[in-house]
Structure formats: C-alpha cells, structure tokens
Image (cartoon, rainbow, N blue to C red):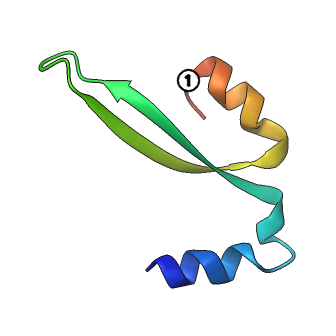
Amino acid sequence: MAKKVVATLKTATGKDWAKVIRAVKSEKTGAYTFREEMVPVDKVQEYLVSGTK
C-alpha cells in the first residue's frame, strides 16, 4: 500500500498535500497513539492548531 501512496504523491497533484502525524493521548489508558492524515499544504497550520480537519 505504501507504494500507491508514494506513487500518488509524486504526481503533480500529490505535491499539494502533506502527511501530518499527530500523537493523541487516550483518555482511558493514558497511552499515546499516532494519527496520520493527508492535509492540503496550505491547511497544515490550521489543522495543527485546531486539532481536526
């Protein structure tokens, strides 16, 4: 599956996106999990500040 993502990101339209990885703390266990999402490059700062898409 990683090959498909890499191939998509190398196209002209794929360069407009960034992969954002965020650590999210579980309220139950207190453990951290990592959430990966593809976000448009111009919306990355908004995404990081707001916490959601």
The residue under the point 76% across, 49% down is 40
What residue would you read off at disc 1? 51
Residue 47 image position (x, y, % from top left): 66, 30
Residue 18 place in picture, x, y as percent: 70, 52
Query: Above or below — where is 14 with respect to 27?
Result: below
Q: Residue at x 48, y 48 (%)?
A: 36
User: Which residue is located at x 62 percent, y 77 percent?
Assistant: 6
Q: Amino acid at mark 1?
A: Gly
Residue 18 vertical position relative to residue 35 in the rendered view, above or below: below
Picture residue at 42% right of the left edge, 42% below the top: 35
Instruction: Identify the element where label 1 is drawn.
Output: loop
Image side of residue 29 versus residue 17, left or right: left
Query: In the picture provided, is 30 more to the left or to the right than 50?
Result: left
The percent coordinates of residue 26 (x first, y second) are 24, 23
Q: Is residue 44 above or below residue 24?
A: below
Q: Is residue 40 left or right of residue 39?
A: right
Quarter of the image with the N terminus is bottom left
Would you identify the image quadrant in which residue 48 lies?
A: top right
The quadrant holding residue 51 is: top right
Q: Quadrant of residue 11?
A: bottom right
Is the residue marked by circle 1 packed among few (<14), some (14-19), or many (20+) residues within 10 Å? Answer: few
In this rendering, is residue 31 above or below 20? Answer: above
Residue at the far left in the pictured view: 29
